[in-house]
Image (spheres, rainbow, N blue to C red):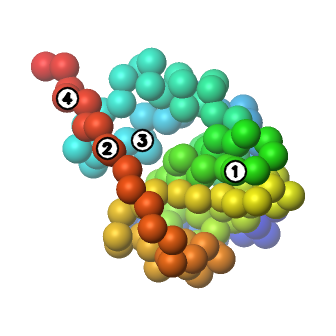
Amino acid sequence: MNLGKSFIETENSLSVTEEIQISIGNVRLEELEPFFSGWTWTPTVEARTALVEKSDIVVAARMGKNLIGIATALTDGGFFAYLSYLEVLPQAQGHGVAKKLVEKVVEMVKDQYDIATITDSETVAFYEKVGFTNNVSGVHLRFLPKNKE
């Protein structure tokens, strides 16, 4: 999938210059580091490895060879899918990259009954814009691993 536009970084933002490519898989562990900047905890190497190797679906957004966004999902292959991770580098946000990542995941699971995600309250509006509804009750238990000093 081709977004039809691409970006160059200029002072914390991107300007359009070439095409963004959306593809399945091929995310290398070392490419993930910038996606955890600003998090309250740093995922271990084992956690990052599991993210790309054990997810049923991994979708990448690239500008040239550079990874600028990633989405992962888990699925039982028949009934339910869970969008487990969606991140776009800050300088690439606001250009439709996250929307295209979600659309690709949804396309891959569209014959199933349901896809769900858990998100922070400030991103609910984004998910509603891409077709998710916020009318289902859900609960979760979040573990915040402590960084090893």
Question: How far across and how far down the image is residue 147, in percent?
Answer: 20, 27
- Residue shown at 79%/42% (left/top)? 77
Single out the mark in the foreground, 1 or 3. Answer: 1
Earlier-in-chain disc, 1 versus 3: 3
Whether the residues at callouts 4 and 1 have beta carbons within 8 Å, the answer is: no
Give the amino acid at mark 2: Arg
Residue 142 badge: 2
Which callout, 4 or 3, points to the residue nearer the camera?
4
Q: Quick one: quadrant of the C terminus?
A: top left
Which image quadrant is residue 52 in? top right
Looking at the rendered structure, which numbered label has been put on residue 34? 3
Amino acid bearing label 4: Lys
Q: In this rendering, does residue 109 appear at all? A: yes
Position of 42 relative to 12 (above/below): above
- What is the residue that sits farthest to the front in this orientation? 137
Return the residue at label 1: 80
